[in-house]
Amino acid sequence: MEKMLPDEIVKQIRDVFKQLKHPVELLFFGSQARCEYCNEIQQLLEELIPLSGQLSLSIHDLEQEPDLARHYQVEGKAPAIVITAREGDQLTDYGIRYLGIPSGHEFTTLIQSILLVSGRDSGLNPQTRAYLKTLTTPLHLEVFVTPT
């Protein structure tokens, strides 16, 4: 199978991944039954993981592991990438999901999300953090991107 990432891009990503501070595990949820880009995304992630010792990958099928998909709130959403912080055997879920194929500018977003989780800091300013602490009901935020 032909590599998806050209050597020059691999070099750039490797340089960016030098900024990774703590381990990150990507959980990939696909589906054998219905997933148009699952093979391509899995290959892309398998090419990314070796670019840093801070990264690991686990691959899951929505139909074969419905409880895990429900736990990560990705049931019925193949393909899905859950970006988690790894501390030994423990995964910490910050709620960052990537649904669909990370192509074009969205690939940069995926890389930035990995960096964010690795840093274990949201980057939010103190005023925003203080405001968020005042929220008393759950907040669900989704960002949708479509190719142009």
Image: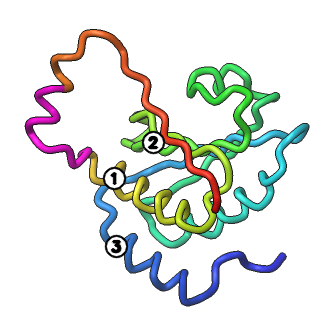
Q: Give the alpha-carbon distance from disc 2 to disc 1, as whole Å.
A: 10 Å
Residue 89 shows up from this direction: yes
Under mark 3, the amino acid is: Lys
Q: How many marks?
A: 3
- Residue extending farthest bottom: 8
Q: Secondary structure at mark 3?
A: helix
- Identified at 39% across, 70% down, the residue is 17
Image quarter hosting the N terminus: bottom right
Say which residue label 1 marks.
116
Say which residue label 3 marks.
18
Q: Position of residue 20 (x, y in %)?
A: 33, 63
Q: Give the alpha-carbon distance from disc 1 to disc 3, as whole Å.
A: 13 Å
The reply to whether the magenta stretch includes residue 53 is no
Tell me where residue 19 sits by quadrant. Answer: bottom left
Say which residue label 2 marks.
84
Magenta highlight range: 121-131
Check the image and report above or below for 106 versus 60. Answer: below
